[in-house]
Amino acid sequence: MLVASAKPRLAFISPVFLFPNDAGGKIRTTNILRGLKGGAFHITLVSVASEEQRQRWGSEISGVCDQFVHWKPVASKPKWLRAFDLLKALPVNVIADKTPQGAAAAEHVAQSLGVDLVVFDFVHSAVLWPDKLTCASVCFTHNVEAEIFARHAQKASNPFQRWMWSSQHKKMLRFEREALSKFTTVIAVSERDARTFAQNYAVADSQAIPTGVDLEFFSWSEPPLNNEVTTATVVFTGSMDWAANIDGVQFFLKEVWPMVLSGLPTAKFVVVGRHPPPALVALAQQTQNVQFTGFVDDVRPYVHAAHVFVIPLLVGGGTRIKAFEAMAMGCPIVSTSIGTEGLGAEPDVHFLERDGAPAMAQAILTLLSDSALRNQLSHRARQIVEQQFGHQVAANAFERICLHAVSRHANR
């Protein structure tokens, strides 16, 4: 009688604790791990986690892995002390992930767990690379990180900020190129990013997966009617402590929203996301019909109640998980071209893509007044998400690439 061989072992190193799923990267990673569990690999999640986090989120952790290995978090440095990191050789967001505890956990994985593949989540986590790693390795990239810094530098008007972003761009470009060259395979979240890694960084094996959405959780409903009972509502969701979101919402409040109000004074704008900076909240308080919710346990009621979902990003990278969630829920999208970069859907068929404040404001006003157009975009968006972007589709693609990486490493 033949005995089935044990599954190959995959260790997944995440420099952030995944729960709650309050940021796009956490959501994407969690969906991938949830889809991988029970498949071709035995999954060990290796992550920073406090005792309180382990106890509170125990069932969620067990839902994404077969084994959990953690390291204790390090207290964050005060902002004034973190400013000195700008002068160091590594980018500031990489320095934040370089801790002795994280490095020790990665070394333990490499030396003691007998793994066949190590996956590093985000290129930042490559700073934890063990001294000796003899198995296959994969980097799961969520963005082209250097590109984000370059876009911030191009947009900055303040000389100090322009210097800061330019300096960080150069450091990240060097770190990203050197780090990605070490991996057996690099996984990107869009074909565009995969091509960038291959062409600009000479990555030998760069492959893309689709962005995955939980279609049951983010269920579809027809956009609400716009009448005397229902206030015309525009919504944005995203972590409000991320620079690109702060920049985009600020642009929207200052330049787009006044134009929307001039056409429809009763319209309401709702910003859903954790930790909005005080300066942005103050700007909102000075602007008519704007609400910041702060952190919420569930974004779905806010999106289902809205007539239009906006993505006013002027900088960023990868793909925006918020776009796929809105499409799955049936909320029509108006976005800048950067906001829908790498989306894999068609402008004016599945969403409206408009650059510049006047064009974006006009598109919003058109959607708020045209229920037929809202419904058309809603149905088409849900259809393409169902066909191409279910989270299990993305997880299956991720698994195939990981198996390929193990085989590729073995045949070197």
Image (tube, rainbow, N blue to C red):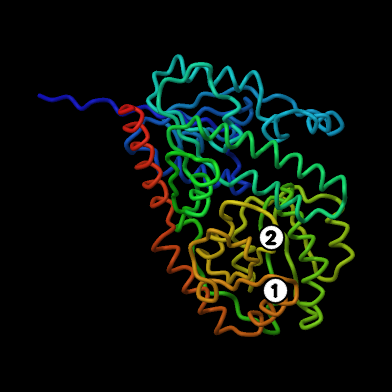
Residue shown at 70%/84% (left/top)?
228
The quarter of the displayed image where residue 253 is located: bottom right
Q: Nearer the viewer, residue 180 or 378?
A: 180
Q: Is residue 371 left or right of residue 242?
A: left
Q: How many marks?
A: 2
Question: Which SS class for mark 2?
Answer: loop
The quarter of the displayed image where residue 226 is located: bottom right
Question: Which SS class for mark 1?
Answer: helix
The quarter of the displayed image where residue 323 is located: bottom right
Q: Residue furthest top?
A: 112
Q: Residues within 10 Å of mark 1 (few under 14, many from 20)?
A: many
Q: Is residue 71 left or right of residue 42?
A: right
Residue shown at 45%/49% (left/top)?
208
Spot occupied by residue 132 in the image (x, y as percentages of width and height): 49, 16
Spot occupied by residue 193 in the image (x, y as percentages of width and height): 53, 50
| Circle 2: residue type | Leu
| Circle 1: residue type | Met
Q: Name the residue carrying label 1.
A: 360
Q: Name the residue carrying label 2.
A: 313
Q: Nearer the viewer, residue 401 or 215?
A: 401
Spot occupied by residue 333 in the image (x, y as percentages of width and height): 60, 69
Q: Residues within 10 Å of mark 2 (few under 14, many from 20)?
A: many
